[in-house]
Image (spheres, rainbow, N blue to C red):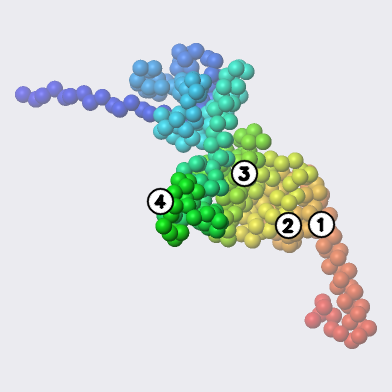
Amino acid sequence: MEEAPTHVPQAEETPSVEDLVDPMPLDRPAKMRRMEEPATRSESSASPEKGISRADSQNMILRMSQKGMSVDAIADVWNVEAVEIVKTLELMRSGKDSQSSTEVGHGWTAWVKRLVEDPPELCCPISQELMEDPVVAADGITYERRCIAEWFQSNSGSPTTRETLSTHVLNPSQRMKSAVIAYKEKTVQEILPVASQVPTDDALKLLSRGEQFVRASLPDASAKKKLSSLLLFRGKRMPPGNRRAVIEELVPMLLEVRDMSQLQELLADMDGQEVLWFLRQVDEDMIKSLSVPGPHRILVCKELTRRITDSAIADAQAERLGFLWGLPSPTKG
């Protein structure tokens, strides 16, 4: 006699990161939102007791933030990156009342603060700054080499315990150095995806932080690519009159690697004076290969005309000099 097939329940579907962003209005009743969803969606995922809708997940994240949970703690609960929680909270802030917006703003501010402040466990006890060349002293504590060496010039004891040390020998700490490097890389990875979405003041703080970390790794090719992205974001968030230095550093970098996509993005955000300066830094082939935004096309035409005219005048002058001095014509030689 055959046994009746055993029903194996399906695992509940965990909301994906993309599901955290729900295009439906958040103030619509959950029942109405489910009725408007496609009929092909399974009942198990639409049912509150068997699954969580995208709108509900957003509201849960908002409530967790309002209860005082940090962005990182919420990210741990949902098993996603903190940056995804920040994006969701920013979306909710733009669609909720002023009180909710303020509460979400506090969560956002805490997240920015975490990224721009040095974690104490990676800081030198003397300078209170991130360690670049960490070493372990005889007291078993890790310090920045420069700081502890300066301390020993006028002190014989430990700067932390105040106990007399038998030796001033310093041993490099590769473990701490690796931890600092990993922290910097992770911070830059968190900054890049949201640099264009956060409020301007916060964005400039984050971008400055990211640049500080990346510049230390130059001229590494990967660091240079990250720096160009950070500079591009910073240039777009700054007023046109204040970003000339950023553009002057960024343009040669992009020309060196021939990054046409970022060049196009930079060009689209420039004003007339910036475009004119940019055009005079590149060759004719580069100008012709760029898709210049409509308002600036006349500047491109003027620049190409100027170059053609200057070239023609130079050739004519050379030909006249060649006639006078018996030199071969540049157009014939």
Q: Mark 2 or mark 1, which has the lower sequence index?
A: 2
Q: Earlier in the sequence, mark 3 or mark 4?
A: 4
In the image, which is nearer the foreground, mark 2 or mark 4? 4
Question: Residue at (65%, 56%) from the top-left corner?
Answer: 254
Label 2 and label 1: CA atoms lie apart by 9 Å
Q: Residue 148 at x, y = what percent? A: 52, 54
Badge 1 local density, few (<14 within 10 Å), some, or many (20+)? some
With 119 as the anchor, is 8 left or right in this view? left
* Above or below for 80 versus 252: above
Tell me, for residue 156, which label it has, or none.
none
Residue on which disc 1 sits: 303
Location of residue 137 by image quarter: bottom left
Viewer-side label of 3, 2: 3
Which is more N-terminal, label 4 or label 2? 4
The amino acid at mark 3 is Leu
Q: Residues within 10 Å of mark 2 (few under 14, many from 20)?
A: some
Extreme residue in the bottom direction: 326
The residues tagged by marks 2 and 4 sit, at their Cα atoms, a distance apart of: 60 Å
**Residue at numbered disc 4:** 140
Which comes before the other along the chain, label 3 or label 2?
A: 3
Three-letter amino acid code of the residue under disc 1 = Glu
Q: Report how far apart the C-alphas of labels 1 and 4 lie in the structure.
A: 65 Å
Quick one: 280 or 138, which is closer to the camera?
A: 138
Q: Secondary structure at mark 3?
A: helix
Q: Quadrant of residue 293?
A: top right
Looking at the image, residue 71 sits to the left or right of residue 105; the answer is left
Q: Is residue 269 visible?
A: yes
Residue at the image position 57 percent from the left and 35 percent from the top: 112
Q: Position of residue 28 (x, y in %)?
A: 53, 14
Residue beneath disc 2:
287
Q: Which residue is mark 3?
A: 207
Left/right of residue 249 with respect to residue 163 in the rendered view: right
